[in-house]
Image (tube, rainbow, N blue to C red):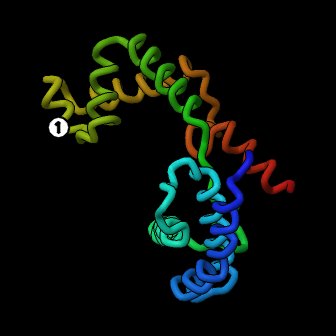
Amino acid sequence: MAIDPALRQAMLDAIPHLRAFAISLSGDVTSADDLVQTALMRGLENLAKFQPGTSMQAWLFTILRNQFYTEIRRRRREVPDPEGVMAGNLAVLPEQGARLDLNDMQAALARLCVEQREALLLVGAEGVSYEEAARICGTTLGTIKSRVNRARTRLAELLELEPEEDLGPDRLVRATLFLHAAV
């Protein structure tokens, strides 16, 4: 990209003033140098937007100032983690596994008889007590307990759950933890 020599010289002449301004804003020479470099790069990228006859220095000051305040706003949302310790401890499980598990659970629930599904959903999903579920369903406490137990057993069969998987992390989480512990 060919730059008009006069514009190039105006940019070069502005560098010491930009640096002084950046130091006064940031209070740090290293940050100031980064700000100046970013301002010059943005100035070059947007040189077509510069209006001849106006002050190149003032235009670059505006770019630098805007960049400084953008970085301040960005830092407010960021958590300092220079060693990467916090980032190393963050992990997000893949969402598709949970979605597939939900689909499997819905299909399995649909295969239960209505009475078992009703009892299980009231007690397990809605948190209704056995006594209250018995009243809602118009049956006895023992019948509700039996229906819930049979529904849980049948769901475990339909979902092919193994006893150690019933509670705690699933296979994916256990594999991840195993790999993390091995490293």
User: Quick check: can you spot residue 174?
Assistant: yes
Q: Quadrant of the C terminus?
A: bottom right
Q: How many marks?
A: 1
In the image, residue 154 sits, relative to residue 57, either above or below, namely: above
> Residue 131 falls in which quadrant of the image?
top left
Residue occupying the far right of the picture: 183
Residue 22: x and y in percent read 57, 80
In the image, residue 151 sits, relative to residue 178, either above or below, namely: above
Front residue of this view, candidates 71 and 19: 19
Tell me the crowding category of disc 1: few under 14, some 14 to 19, or many 20 or more residues within 10 angstroms, Cα based. some
Q: SS of the residue at dot 1?
A: helix
Residue 124: x and y in percent read 34, 36
Residue 49: x and y in percent read 51, 50
Q: Residue at x 33, y 20 (%)?
A: 117
Residue 139: x and y in percent read 18, 24
Q: Residue at x 50, y 68 (%)?
A: 55
> Residue 148 falls in which quadrant of the image?
top left
Front residue of this view, candidates 73 and 35: 35
Q: Residue at x 60, y 37 (%)?
A: 94
Seen in the image, is 140 located left or right of residue 13? left
In the image, residue 147 sits, relative to residue 169, either above or below, namely: above
Q: Residue tagged by mark 1?
A: 132
What type is the residue that disc 1 sits on? Glu
Q: Quadrant of the N terminus?
A: top right
User: Quick check: can you spot residue 85?
Assistant: no
Q: Residue at x 69, y 71 (%)?
A: 12
